[in-house]
Image (spheres, rainbow, N blue to C red):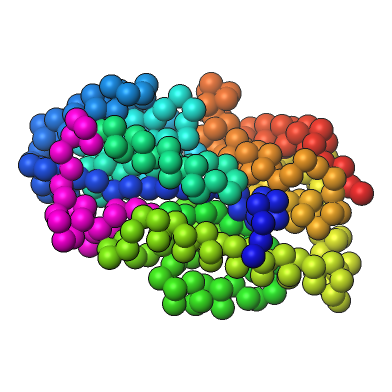
Amino acid sequence: MADNSSMSTVVASSRIRLARNLNGYPFPSRLKGDKQAKEIIRAVSSAINKVDEFRLYYMDGIPEEEALNLVENHLVSPLLLKRPRCSAALINEKRNVSIMINEEDHLREQCIEKGYALREAYATMSRKDNAMARSLQFAYDEQLGYLTACPTNLGTGLRASVMLFLPALTMSGLMPRVIRSANRLGLTVRGMYGEGSQAEGYMYQLSNEVTLGVTEEEILFQVEQVAGRVADMEHSERAKLRTGERAMAVKDACLRACGILSNCALMSGEEMERLCAELKLGICLGYVSAEGVGWVDDLIIKMKPSNLTLSADRRLTAAERDQYRAEYVSRRVRESAKPI
């Protein structure tokens, strides 16, 4: 089983998400007008701010660019933006904990930590959830557990997930087998942005499917075990990439990516993400010297369109974004990565 040091080049982030609903109110899709939605928002905001400071974002009260920025930073889901008059989000100062209000459920509480930190994320989210439960009455049934809008979330309401960087398994064609094996164990593998999304930059989200009839500890243990096995497989395939018949072609692609990222005048978001994935692989295989790969993940997020617009404090044209992105990425990569 992979240890924590080897997991660091496979697991980009860890997330805990809890689904909760309030007694006395219909599920969000059946709320009777804005009045009930606003009551829920006020109640949840009051409950969490008794124990911690969170900023409240009304989805109909912030600019579209800022709302998209929250999506790109994985702080809210695209679904939350579809009914802005009824939805809101609470986000802490560290921006690792967010509580979406009136998405599919009244509350979607989540904590995202960098790297392999599933237990830490769970401990953080569990404390927040317990604190809110002292002020809010969650919908709960002795047999079914927490009551949720979608039956697949009944029981614990817990989704534990890790974001995995799996270039070698993807290139070897083994990902379909990995996905089938995970499905047989009651887990699911999706793209970077969850259900229905594609695996951009060799990034996959592994999470539990079953929430009913199991404990939270059993869910965490199972996700950890499968993540460890997948990491072992990924490291095995990475070793083959270094020594197999494609070794020189892989090395060339990694070094070319580092060179282009270090010296460019224009760069689209799609090209940057593709090249950053190759750069990360080069770091993992020892072709490029750098302090880990986490900074590359941060760079990808920072260069998303809405983040660029907010940094510039004005709306940028596509050409301006590509120029700004190229300048920033070139400088950052030259500072942090050196071909060996």
What residue sits 55% from the left and 38% below the top?
305
Q: Is residue 40 left or right of residue 291?
A: left
Q: Answer whether residue 199 is visible to the viewer in this image.
A: no
Of residues 66 and 234, the one drawn nearer to the viewer in this rendering: 234
Q: Residue 325 in the image: x percent, y percent?
A: 67, 36
Is 133 rendered above or below residue 30?
above
The question of residue 95 being in magenta is answered with: no
The quarter of the image holding the N terminus is bottom right
Is 142 rendered above or below residue 46?
below
Q: Residue 61 in the image: x percent, y percent?
A: 30, 26
The image quadrant of residue 207 is bottom left
Q: Is residue 152 left or right of residue 201?
A: left
Q: Residue 161 in the image: x percent, y percent?
A: 47, 55
> How many numbered circles does the render carry?
0
Q: Is residue 219 left or right of residue 192?
A: left
Q: Answer whether residue 302 is visible to the viewer in this image.
A: yes
The image quadrant of residue 331 is top right
Is 200 rendered above or below residue 300?
below
Of residues 52 and 180, the one drawn nearer to the viewer in this rendering: 52
Of residues 305 and 237, the one drawn nearer to the viewer in this rendering: 237
What residue sits 31% from the left and 38% below the top?
129
What residue sits 16% from the left and 61% below the top?
143
Q: Residue 81 in the image: x percent, y percent?
A: 32, 41
Of residues 40 and 144, the one drawn nearer to the viewer in this rendering: 144
What residue sits 55% from the left and 54% below the top?
163
Q: Is residue 255 left or right of residue 185?
A: right
Q: Main secondary structure of the magenta part?
A: loop
Q: What range of the chain is rendered magenta?
A: 133-159
Hey, which residue is sitting farthest right in the picture? 340
